[in-house]
Amino acid sequence: MQVTRRQFFKVCAVGIGTSSVAALGFSTDALADVRPYKLAASSETRNTCPYCSVSCGLIMHSLGDKAKNAEPSIFHIEGDPDHPVNRGTLCPKGAGLVDFIHSPNRLKHPEYRAPGSKEWQRISWDKAFTRIARLMKEDRDKNFIAKNSAGATVNRWLTTGFLAASASSNESGYITHKVVRSTGILAFDNQARV
Ligand code: SF4
């Protein structure tokens, strides 16, 4: 669009307003248009911040209509206003979680480093779980203490520990506690202690 010097001063003389902007050739429709709300078409998923023991509740917003071939992508995260811990607030670390999710350094698969090796190799979840279960069984069979020196039943397994994550719900935390204690493990903690 060309605006001559004469046209410009003529418009300025009557004052800048919608009609004068239109006189310059701009569309008034564009001025009246409201920018669409960026979360209007997003899908919401609730989760828990993985960073610290406060365990703030999150709402994660993603794009993707859940069609078979659509790849969903999280583009915005905010505090969950209904969560009893944080009531919608997040500290700066939690507020930056989108960067953590999309970080190229984020670990997404189990990895294994053989004894003496400097290299990590990616393994399947099946292989990881099988290996963990086998090593736990071997250690428990070797070190389980059924009775103490006084002959009292103690059923302790002191050579293995277990750490649960803060992203566990109350229900999964309860079940995890029951399973771990049933093996005799005493060294058991939860990152969030919830
Ligand atoms: S948002 Fe901050 S305070 Fe809350 S759990 Fe995450 S790191 Fe902790």
Image (tube, grey):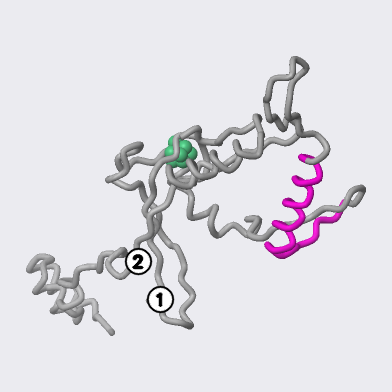
Q: Nearer the viewer, residue 59 or 126?
A: 126
Q: Position of residue 96 (x, y in %)?
A: 47, 48
On whether residue 112 falls in the magenta region, the answer is no
**Outermost top residue:** 150
**Location of residue 5 (image quadrant):** bottom left
How would you classify the magenta stretch by its main secondary structure? helix
Q: Position of residue 11 (x, y in %)?
A: 13, 73
Distance from disc 2 to disc 1, alpha carbons, whole Å, reads: 9 Å
- Residue density around tag 1, few if under 14, some if 14–19, many if 20 or more, within 10 Å: few
Q: Count every numbered label the image shows and give the total.
A: 2
Q: Position of residue 87 (x, y in %)?
A: 30, 40
Secondary structure at numbered mark 1 = loop
In the rendered structure, are the residues bearing label 2 and label 1 in contact, judged by CB atoms less than 8 Å apart?
yes
Marking on residue 43: 2
Locate ligand 1 by image quadrant.
top left
Marking on residue 140: none
Q: Which residues are magenta?
A: 118-140
The residue sitting at 38% across, 61% down in the picture is 61
**Outermost right residue:** 116
Query: Which residue has dot 1 on it?
Result: 66
Question: In the displayed structure, would residue 122 be above or below residue 100?
Answer: below
**Location of residue 13 (image quadrant):** bottom left
